[in-house]
Image (spheres, rainbow, N blue to C red):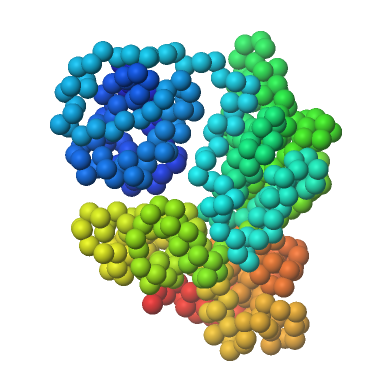
Amino acid sequence: MNAAKELWQKMLTALETEVSAVNFDVWIKTLEPINILDGKLILCASNAQVRNFVCDKFRPMIMSAMSALNPYMTDVVLIDPSERESVAAAEETFVIDEPEPPARIEANVLSPRYNFESFVVGKSNRHMYEAARAVAEQPGVQYNPLFIYGGTGLGKTHIMHAIGNYVRIKHPHLKVLYAGSEKFVNEYIESVRTTKGKSSNFREKYRGVDVLMIDDIQFIVGKQGSQEEMFNTFNELHQAGKQLIFTSDRPPQEMDIEERLISRFQWGLLTDVVPPDFELRVAILHKKAQLEKFNIPGEVLSYIAERVQSNVRAMESILNKVNFLSRLNEQEPSIETVTEALKDYSDKNEEFVTAERVIYCTCKYYNVRSEDLTGKKKNREIVEPRQVCIYLITELLSLPLASIGSLFGGRDHTTVMHARDKIAGLVQSNIKIKVAVSDIKEMVLKRD
């Protein structure tokens, strides 16, 4: 494999995580590495139109991926097939072995497109955003550790990358390490299993940093050795005044891990993030369209926001597909384009069903007001619908109990557990409750 192809293969691995699957397969993966000339990577597009589109939309991202792998490379040049033969025939020049990575190279896994400026703030994520800004400004000073929890696709990973990117700019002397908990577990197992010295290398990597960020920490559940290592890593870093940040799909108290580790996770600030409301979803789509230079009408963005409610990542994926289909068909994006984009998506009830929808349907069934159902009232006419609603949310959605409690006036997760278990029992013995749960569930799952 020549140097251009070898470099490009490594770049593809990095770029695949930076763009949607559609954009990667259609625009990035189809580029052909031709040569390296004077430190410039030459890539050939399938035609001039593709070359122009990639130059306009993806070239900065491609440049960033190349620089992270080999900082001595100077440029990326895109050509069309008419130029291919002459460029391919030229002798490769300025081929330099990749340099030894600097001490803080681990930070390079952070995506530059995930920053505070591109994060859209609303009621559902404001606490998380403000806490993240405070930690990024003064790592290790307050909110240590910062523990962020919530469902999939709600911005936890984005905000973690934003912290890391901000720290790298504001505090360039600090060493930042971002890793998923599966990576932590796998590297720990490897350090124990393999040759002498690996264990000390592992510990030096995770304990020799100023900011440690572990994504999806819930994956250490059931892994006792990894929990022990995390406990010791936590203690050493925290005692040294280093910043720790964790994300999870649930709060610490709902994780089946050692009590002492739960206690450590609760030392700093726990903050949750819940699915965005309609206005925030529209704002996110507008921001995404602006950043990606998509020309999509406002009513189309609103329609996407109506149809995809609980997962920001899925919503952005649909936006990418709408843009792709409109370009492919050479038509203006429309409601019909969204409908086509949703074909492979519409049967996923976990995306269609939201806590808001369950609350709305419960209120409609019992003829009660939403503010009463989610408020502080404790009269019998409200308590039963509220408990049924909580039960259905736990059945239909994988939200943390604490997040569900926050939807109902900030109730504690133990109150949510009580409501869930009580209705679960009554469904087996009380025909009225059984019918109510069945009817409301049917209302929730019925598509307009």
As drawn, the residue found furthest toward the right would be: 239
Taking 295 as reference, is 34 above or below it?
above
Question: Residue 44 in the image: x percent, y percent?
Answer: 24, 31
Question: Residue 12 in the image: x percent, y percent?
Answer: 38, 32
Identity of the residue drawn at 29% across and 68% down: 334
Who is closer to the viewer here, 252 or 421? 252
Who is closer to the viewer here, 336 or 344? 336
Question: Residue 350 in the image: x percent, y percent?
Answer: 48, 61
For residue 332, what is the image quadrant?
bottom left
Taking 199 as reference, is 322 above or below it?
below
Query: Left or right: where does residue 329 sit relative to residue 317?
Result: left
For residue 176, what is the image quadrant?
top right
The quadrant in which the N terminus is found is top left
Who is closer to the viewer here, 164 or 420? 164
Query: Left or right: where does residue 334 sit relative to residue 119?
Result: left
Residue 214 visible in rendering: no
Identity of the residue drawn at 69% across and 87% down: 381
Identity of the residue drawn at 42% across and 38% down: 61
